[in-house]
């Protein structure tokens, strides 16, 4: 009797068993492998290569969109942008007549560094250019 029941279930299994079997087959299937190469996932070997790439980028940023895109990408790395990069961004902001971006750059720099002393070192390193361009520090305007 039991063997008849087993053979009957093999021929016509209940619907829930079919559904469970489909789920198991899907979960045991090998995953589809795909490899994408994005420009932001590219590793730069040295700080000098990182600096050179972004200084060149900001020297030729044609509009605000490219400036924003470059800032988002430069700040997405695990290192803080170097002083030459910050100087070049300030010059690009002046060239594009966009003071708010220059102020936001300094605020983002303040958030990116580890300590307040590091931020003050950045401010002293770019003080001459910042005053020449008329860019106030975020603290000066209450940001």
Image: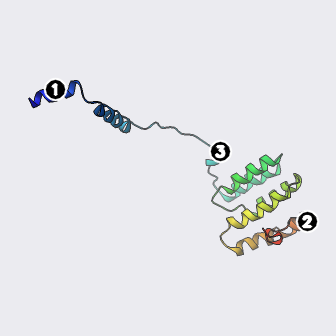
Q: Which mark is residue 132?
A: 2
User: Is disc 1 surrounded by few (<14), some (14 to 19) or many (20+) residues within 10 Å?
Assistant: few
Please say which color scheme the image uses: rainbow
Q: Residue at x 14, y 29 (%)?
A: 5
The residue that mark 3 highlights is 39
Q: Quadrant of the N terminus?
A: top left
Q: SS at mark 1?
A: helix
For the residues bearing labels 1 and 3, Cβ distance under 8 angstroms:
no
Left or right, 129 with respect to 120, comes to: right
Left or right: 49, with 27 as reference point: right
Q: Is residue 105 above or below residue 40?
A: below
Reading the image, the residue beneath label 1 is: 7
Q: How far across and how far down the image is residue 126, in percent? A: 82, 67
Q: Earlier in the sequence, mark 1 or mark 3?
A: 1
Inter-mark Cα distance, 2 to 1: 90 Å
Q: Residues within 10 Å of mark 2 (few under 14, many from 20)?
A: few
Image quadrant in which you'd find residue 104? bottom right
Residue 10, placed above or below residue 61: above
Q: Is residue 56 left or right of residue 40?
A: right
Distance from the alpha carbon under mark 3 to that under mark 2: 35 Å
Left or right position of 110 against 42: right
* Residue at the (72%, 62%) spot, across then down: 108
Q: Is residue 132 visible?
A: yes
Q: Nearer the viewer, residue 39 or 114?
A: 114
Observer-nearest of 34 and 53:
34
């Amino acid at each position: 009797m039991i063997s008849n029941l087993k053979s009957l279930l093999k021929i016509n299994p209940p619907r829930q068993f079919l559904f469970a079997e489909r789920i198991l087959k899907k979960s045991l299937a090998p995953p589809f492998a795909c490899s994408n190469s994005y420009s932001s996932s590219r590793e730069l070997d040295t700080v000098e290569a990182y600096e050179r790439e972004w200084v060149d980028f900001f020297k030729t940023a044609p509009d605000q969109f490219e400036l924003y895109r470059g800032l988002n990408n430069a700040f997405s790395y695990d290192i803080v942008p170097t002083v030459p990069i910050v100087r070049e961004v300030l010059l690009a902001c002046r060239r594009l007549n966009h003071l708010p971006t220059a102020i936001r750059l300094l605020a983002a720099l303040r958030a990116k560094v580890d300590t307040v002393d590091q931020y003050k070192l950045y401010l002293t390193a770019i003080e001459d250019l910042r005053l020449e361009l008329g860019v106030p520090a975020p603290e000066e305007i209450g940001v």
